[in-house]
Image (cartoon, rainbow, N blue to C red):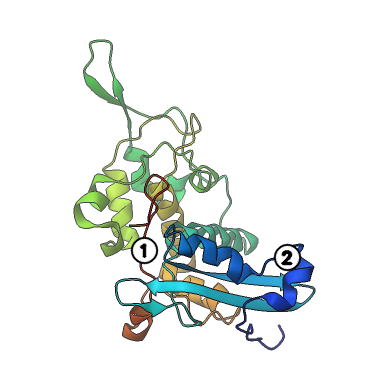
């Protein structure tokens, strides 16, 4: 790895000709800010080894704080990509196989049943026809709902990976594995817990050692400091194409 480079903060005009546009990234984004569709944004453009960043609008419209290089984003489900990378790094190391049943590492998963309606209309539980594997979990086809009742009750971010497994064991499957895609936090949490089991490390520590430290990712964390939190982005959404809220 070479030395890290700071991306110069400009409006992107130096790269305007290279990105096939007569408009700078800052000007393009500013229109959305002016219309009230977003509070602010940051762009990064890399062309032929040149990198430039541009900041427009506000990171927090409730205080008037603008975007800058310290602004911290909540990456939410982009964390799932890191889980996939963690699993594949363990596969590369010979610690697991993608087609291993989850119950090989978490035996209690063998007790999970599929919930469905019986001929009389009553809810029944039956064993799944297919064992769920790591590959199925990473592909969101293990049969689980988006989250477990335990995660809804206690809050997903308050649970350890081991506690997420407890919630998964107590949560019936919506359908047999491989039947249908269902975007699911449960699937990914199970895969993350398997990483903990085969490496003997907490999931966040394994990501830190395997990815964040080697890549010099100093501002990515599961546990933001008070300073980082003071620079976090105000989370907003656009409602029916109107003003953000």
**As displayed, is residue 222 above or below residue 130?**
below
Residue 76 visible somewhere in the drawing? yes
Task: Say which element carries label 2.
Answer: loop
Q: Is residue 161 left or right of residue 85?
A: left
**Residue at x 35% of width, y 86% of height:** 227
Residue 22, numbered circle: 2
Q: Within the image, what quadrant is residue 240 found in?
A: top left
Residue that numbered label 1 is attached to: 235
**Residue at x 55% of width, y 81% of height:** 213
Q: Is residue 165 left or right of residue 203?
A: left
- Depth check: 141 or 22 in front? 22
**As displayed, is residue 129 above or below residue 95?**
above
Q: Is residue 220 left or right of residue 92?
A: left
User: Residue 43 in the image: x percent, y percent?
Assistant: 58, 70
Determine the CA span between mark 2 and mark 1: 31 Å
Q: Which quadrant: the C terminus?
A: bottom left
Q: Within the image, what quadrant is residue 19 found in?
A: bottom right
Q: Residues within 10 Å of mark 2 (few under 14, many from 20)?
A: few
Mark closer to the chain start, 2 or 1:
2
Task: Say which element carries label 1.
Answer: loop
**As displayed, is residue 28 above or below residue 218?**
above
**Residue at x 43% of width, y 30% of height:** 176
User: Residue 208 in the image: x percent, y percent?
Assistant: 49, 76
- Depth check: 79 or 226 in front? 226
**Residue at x 20% of width, y 56% of height:** 154
- Depth check: 204 or 49 in front? 49
User: Residue 21 in the image: x percent, y percent?
Assistant: 73, 63
User: Residue 18 in the image: x percent, y percent?
Assistant: 78, 69
Q: Within the image, what quadrant is residue 39 found in?
A: bottom left
Residue 201 visible somewhere in the drawing? no
Q: Residues within 10 Å of mark 1 (few under 14, many from 20)?
A: few
């Amino acid at each position: 790895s070479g030395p890290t480079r700071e991306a110069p903060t400009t409006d992107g005009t130096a790269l305007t000709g290279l990105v096939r546009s007569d408009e700078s990234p800052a000007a393009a984004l500013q229109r959305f800010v002016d219309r009230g569709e977003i509070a602010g944004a940051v762009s990064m453009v890399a062309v032929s080894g040149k990198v430039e960043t541009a900041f427009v609008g506000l990171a927090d419209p409730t205080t008037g704080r603008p975007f800058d290089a310290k602004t911290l984003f909540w990456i939410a489900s982009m964390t799932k990509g890191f889980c996939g990378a963690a699993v594949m790094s363990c596969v590369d190391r010979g610690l697991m196989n993608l087609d291993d049943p989850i119950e090989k590492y978490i035996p209690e998963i063998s007790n999970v049943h599929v919930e469905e309606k019986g001929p009389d209309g009553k809810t029944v539980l039956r064993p799944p026809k297919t064992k769920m594997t790591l590959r199925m979990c990473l592909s969101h086809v293990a049969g689980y709902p988006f989250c477990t009742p335990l995660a809804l009750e206690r809050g997903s971010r308050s649970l350890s990976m081991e506690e997420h497994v407890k919630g998964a064991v107590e949560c019936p499957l919506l359908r047999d594995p491989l039947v249908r895609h269902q975007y699911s936090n449960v699937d990914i949490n199970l895969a993350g817990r398997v990483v903990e089991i085969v490496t003997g490390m907490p999931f966040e520590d394994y990501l830190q050692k395997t990815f964040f430290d080697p890549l010099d990712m100093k501002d990515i964390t599961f546990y933001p400091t008070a300073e980082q939190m003071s620079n976090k982005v105000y989370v907003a959404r656009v409602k029916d194409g109107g003003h953000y809220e």
